[in-house]
Image (cartoon, rainbow, N blue to C red):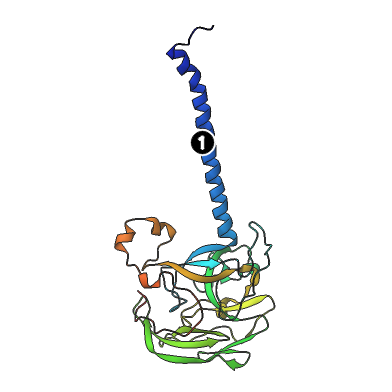
C-alpha cells in the first residue's frame, strides 16, 4: 500500500492540469472570436453592408448623417477578393437608390476628380450613392432642368413644400415618376442644371443622378457606372443624426448626448411611393 501524498505534492501535480485547461479555454475563446469575425465579414461582403451619407446630393430622400444598410444580395453578391458575382434575384431597375464604387483621382480640382473605376483603375476607390436614372441603351437628356429618358419627359409635379439644405437655402420639392418609381427630388432656384447630355448609356452600364438635382456630382459630369461596381440598393436607415462624423464618431459616447438625433428617420425604408411632404429643414 502506497504512502499518502502530502498537500504540497498534490498541488504540484495539479498545476500542469490547470495550465492545460487554461490553454484549452484560451484557444476556444480565440477560435470563437475568429469565427465570429469571419461570419461578420462574410455577412458584410455578401449580404448587407453599412453606409453613411456624407453629402446632400440625395436630398430630400437621404440627408447627411443617415446611416443605412445596403442589400448586397438582391443584385447578386460578389465572392470576397474576386470580381465573380453570384446570381441575384433581379437586375437594377430605374429608380433604385444604389451604393456603388467610383474612382477619385488625386490632384484634380473638386468636381473633376471623380471617374468611373474601370476607366481609371489607378484611382482611389470611394463609395457613392445615387438613383438609377438610365438603363443600358437609354438616351438621357436634361433640357432646361427637365429630365428626358428616350425622348420622353419624366413626369414631375411641384409640391407646396421646401426643404432647407445645411446652409439654410430653401430647395423646391417635386414628386417625380421615374419608370415605376415615384419619389421626391429637390431643385435649387439659384442654380441651373448642367451636365454632359444627351447621353447614350452603354451596355452593361447605368446612368446615375442624385435627387438633389442641382447639387449632385453624378453621371452628368463623369459618365456611367458598370454593373460590376454596384454594391447593391440601399434599403433601410438604421440610424440618423445631425453629424458628418464617420463610424468612429458614432462610437464616442459623448456624441450621444451632444449631437441632435433624428428618431423619426430611424428604421425608415428607402423605397418608391407617394411623396410625403418633408420637414422644412434637413437638420
On screen, residue 86 versus residue 14, left or right, reads right
Is residue 271 something that shows in the picture? yes
Other-residue count near label 1 (Cα within 10 Å), few / some / many at <14 / 14–19 / ≥20: few
Q: Residue at x 49, y 75 (%)?
A: 270
Residue 83 place in picture, x, y as percent: 67, 62
Residue 129 place in picture, x, y as percent: 52, 72
State the residue in front, 94 or 22: 22
For mark 1, give the secondary structure: helix
As drawn, 46 above or below 110: above
State the residue in front, 281 or 48: 48
Residue 272 place in picture, x, y as percent: 51, 81
Q: Residue at x 62, y 93 (%)?
A: 151
As drawn, 156 above or below 260: below
Residue extending farthest left: 258
Quadrant of the image containing the C terminus: bottom left
Is residue 53 something that shows in the picture? no
Quadrant of the image containing the N terminus: top right
Residue hosting label 1: 26
Residue 10 place in picture, x, y as percent: 47, 16
Q: Residue at x 50, y 87 (%)?
A: 176
On screen, residue 77 versus residue 242, left or right, reads right
Counting every numbered tag in the picture gives 1
As drawn, 24 above or below 262: above
Amino acid at each position: 500500500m502506497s504512502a499518502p501524498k502530502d498537500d504540497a505534492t498534490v498541488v504540484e501535480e495539479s498545476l500542469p492540469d490547470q495550465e492545460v485547461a487554461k490553454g484549452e479555454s484560451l484557444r476556444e475563446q480565440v477560435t470563437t472570436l475568429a469565427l465570429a469575425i469571419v461570419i461578420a465579414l462574410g455577412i458584410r461582403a455578401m449580404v448587407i453592408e453599412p453606409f453613411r451619407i456624407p453629402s446632400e446630393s440625395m436630398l430630400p430622400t437621404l440627408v447627411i448623417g443617415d446611416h443605412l444598410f445596403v442589400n448586397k444580395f438582391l443584385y447578386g453578391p460578389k465572392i470576397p477578393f474576386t470580381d465573380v458575382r453570384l446570381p441575384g434575384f433581379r437586375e437594377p431597375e430605374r429608380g433604385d437608390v444604389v451604393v456603388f464604387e467610383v474612382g477619385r483621382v488625386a490632384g484634380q480640382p473638386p468636381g473633376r476628380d471623380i471617374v468611373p473605376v474601370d476607366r481609371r483603375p489607378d484611382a482611389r476607390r470611394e463609395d457613392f450613392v445615387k438613383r438609377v436614372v438610365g438603363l443600358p441603351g437609354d438616351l438621357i437628356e436634361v433640357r432646361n432642368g427637365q429630365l428626358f429618358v428616350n425622348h420622353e419627359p419624366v413626369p414631375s409635379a411641384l409640391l407646396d413644400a421646401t426643404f432647407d439644405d445645411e446652409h439654410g437655402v430653401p430647395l423646391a420639392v417635386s414628386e417625380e415618376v421615374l419608370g415605376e418609381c415615384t419619389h421626391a427630388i429637390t431643385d435649387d432656384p439659384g442654380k441651373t442644371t448642367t451636365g454632359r447630355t444627351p447621353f447614350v448609356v452603354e451596355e452593361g452600364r447605368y446612368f446615375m443622378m442624385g435627387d438633389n438635382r442641382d447639387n449632385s456630382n453624378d453621371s452628368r459630369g463623369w459618365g456611367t457606372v458598370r454593373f460590376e461596381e454596384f454594391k447593391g440598393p440601399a434599403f433601410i436607415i438604421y440610424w440618423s443624426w445631425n453629424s458628418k462624423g464617420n463610424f468612429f464618431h458614432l462610437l464616442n459616447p459623448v456624441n450621444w448626448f451632444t449631437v441632435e438625433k433624428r428618431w423619426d428617420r430611424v428604421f425608415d425604408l428607402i423605397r418608391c411611393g407617394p411623396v410625403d411632404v418633408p420637414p422644412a429643414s434637413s437638420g
